[in-house]
Amino acid sequence: MNAGPLVSVVLPVHRAARTVSAAIRSILTQSYRNLELLVIANGSDAATMQEIGGHMSDPRLRPFELPEADLVDALNLGLKESRGAFLARMDADDLSATERLELQVGALQKDTGLGGVSCRVGFCSTLPQSEGLARYVDWQNRLLGHRAIFLNRFVESPLVHPSMVLRREVLLAQGGYRNGDFPEDYELWLRLLESGARFRKLPQTLLTWQDSAGRLTRTDTRYSEMAFHRTKAHFFVERWNRTIAGSRRPLLIWGAGRVSRRFSPLLEEQGLTIEAFIDIDPRKIGNTRRGRPIIAPDEIPYARRPFILSYVPGEIARRLIRQRLRQAAQHEGKDFLFLA
């Protein structure tokens, strides 16, 4: 497919001599031909540079080099140098299906109100410790429409970064990627969602996401559980202060277990007051957590219009809590959200 707007594919690479050629080929052989591939080598070794050089016969490949390994700098360089109306992401150890860009760009052209389009992701790993990541991929693959993505934005990242095609203007309007002690992609999704950007996810599996021991999500503290929860807390508190604080609704935390103990203090550090904790464990009910009472679900003071945040992890727990709150005429997003 040669017609259509230019798509800029940004592919940062550090040291990936074993996989980068296959990743590059999967882009240069796309059915959607009107593309440029910006390969941003950052702190790359000679073997990786040699693999990149083997594809220079295709004029659509535009190589750039940064002396130090820094993913955010590489992404922002790609954004700055890109010339397309759409910006697609790709990682050096992943593979794109031949029709990926054609389908994603088609969806963006069909619905001009979308800020970006993702796709379902296939997962490949030989690591024994990949079960959690596989469950995450399965979970986010079920979040197809904007409402599902938006309501689940604080559970985990609802979008896989290298699966995205974004409108370049939407990304530029938010200042691109930010550098800090947080996951740059998750911070970007929350920032874009809070700005009103809309996303959807195609039902086709168009990217193979390959896990490895060297993946940044495994090795960099910016992708730690604490870093994710700190980012969640920051954006939730911003939303609370903007849309809820003036109504003087009490904040209740569902869950008095390990996750709540560890991460709900992040809300208080940013100025929120937790009135009570909710739990179903009879050994906890009637006790206190950081001076706040632990109450049973039957004791929730619905007449006072509380806002409830759940820190209970797991899909089964979320389903049961959601069912109970809906039975009490509570609306997800308006009256309760999940942060785990």
Image (cartoon, helix red, strand yellow):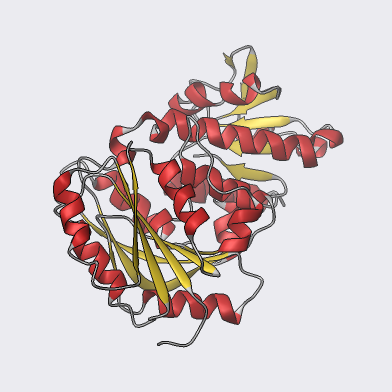
Name the residue rendered at 37%, 74% in the picture: 100
Viewer-side residue, 83 vs 121: 83
Q: Quadrant of residue 14 in the image?
A: top left
Q: Position of residue 335 (x, y in %)?
A: 71, 45
Lateral position of residue 56 relative to residue 245, left or right = left
Viewer-side residue, 34 vs 215: 34
Q: Position of residue 26 (x, y in %)?
A: 26, 70
Relative to 87, residue 231 above or below: above
Name the residue rendered at 53%, 45% in the picture: 177
Residue that sits furthest to the top in the current view? 291
Relative to 310, residue 172 above or below: below
Viewer-side residue, 135 vs 216: 216
Lateral position of residue 180 relative to residue 240, left or right = left
Name the residue rendered at 52%, 34% in the picture: 311
Q: How many marks?
A: 0
Q: Position of residue 297 (x, y in %)?
A: 62, 35
Lateral position of residue 201 relative to residue 96, left or right = right
Task: Please say whether residue 24 is visible from this viewpoint.
Answer: yes
Name the residue rendered at 55%, 58% in the picture: 149
Viewer-side residue, 181 vs 60: 60
Q: Quadrant of residue 233 in the image?
A: top right
Q: Position of residue 239 (x, y in %)?
A: 71, 40
Task: Classify the position of the N terminus by image quarter.
Answer: bottom left
Q: Quadrant of residue 101 in the image?
A: bottom left
Task: Please say whether residue 280 is visible from this viewpoint.
Answer: no
